[in-house]
Image (cartoon, grey):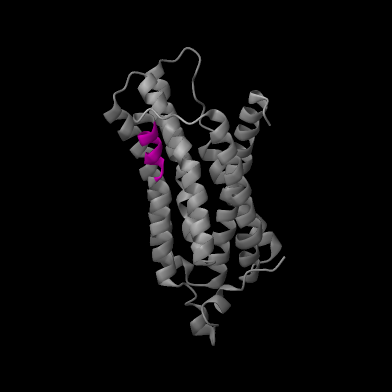
Amino acid sequence: MVRAPSLCAQHGGCSNSKDQLKVIDIPSLDTGLLLALASGLATLIGWCVVGLRKNPSERLVAITLLIVAIVMLTISAGQLIPSALDSGLDKTQVAIAMTVGLFLVLSFSSIPLQRDGSRAKNQALLITVALSLHNLPEGAAPIGATLVNVQTGISTAIVLALHNIPEGIAISATALMAGYGRRIAFYLTLTATLAEILGAIAVYLSKPLLQSEQSVGFLLSGVAGIMIAICLKELIPHSFKVLLRSRHF
């Protein structure tokens, strides 16, 4: 495997200790924020799909999400983790940062949803809250990936967008089936969208904390943990469950 070049090398090298504190490419951060906003807004496409009554089949969604998972795992293993190691972190530090990212996703995804005996409208609200909390750490992924290079940032934003569309469908469809109107369904979907955007803005505003190569390495490791957790906790299990149920896998 060819490792991504170190962050200093990507920005023309670090000639002295003062330069080493300026490894953050501000235009890359700006690009990462724009990509994060775009991938977050893709959640609203799910509302549009439900509103236009063009519901994709479960099998098609499952295949798409499985492809998304493969791409996310490839980016994490082939780009984010090697770049984090090249930043000067040792394997233990990278593992710890990845564990933090994993824990964030698992924590925000563990809100229990009361299905039996609960009212449909309450369930729709609970799903919205759960997905909104789950989306908070996702906003960091495109920004962290863009610090490796713009191509990695674009790839990450695309796969997250493809992941967000079914989330928008789930929120909107549940809200409409619960008796909410299209406007309320839109607001609920928008809530989950804004949660991911909020996570992206939080990372963007933390750039004063990212003024060393190792700080960026910690961010990349955490983002890798987030992406791996999304794949293992949600995308892969859901995809296999649907595909096995359809008996076409």
Left or right: 75 as drawn, with respect to 187:
right
Q: Name the magenta segment's main secondary structure.
A: helix
Residue 55 in the image: above or below residue 88: above
Residue 195 within the segment the image draws in magenta: no
- How far across and how far down the image is residue 115, in percent? 49, 18
Left or right: 133 as drawn, with respect to 81:
left
Q: Residue at x 55, y 34 (%)?
A: 60
Please name whichever residue, 72 or 102, is drawn nearer the observer in this view of the structure.
Answer: 72
Residue at the limit of the structure toward the right, as seen here:
1
- How far across and how far down the image is residue 110, in percent? 54, 33
Quadrant in which the C terminus appears: top right
Please name whichever residue, 130 or 69, is drawn nearer the observer in this view of the structure.
Answer: 69
Residue at the limit of the structure toward the bottom, as seen here:
15
Q: How many marks?
A: 0
Q: Is residue 132 among what the camera can see?
A: yes
Tell me the quarter of the picture where residue 186 sits: top left
Residue 44 within the segment the image draws in magenta: yes
Left or right: 198 as drawn, with respect to 181:
right
Q: Is residue 137 among what the camera can see?
A: no
Residue 137 in the image: above or below residue 51: below
Q: Residue at x 59, y 58 (%)?
A: 221
Q: Residue at x 56, y 73 (%)?
A: 7
Magenta part of the protein: which range?
42-49
Residue 58 in the image: above or below residue 40: above
- How far across and how far down the image is residue 120, in percent? 40, 17
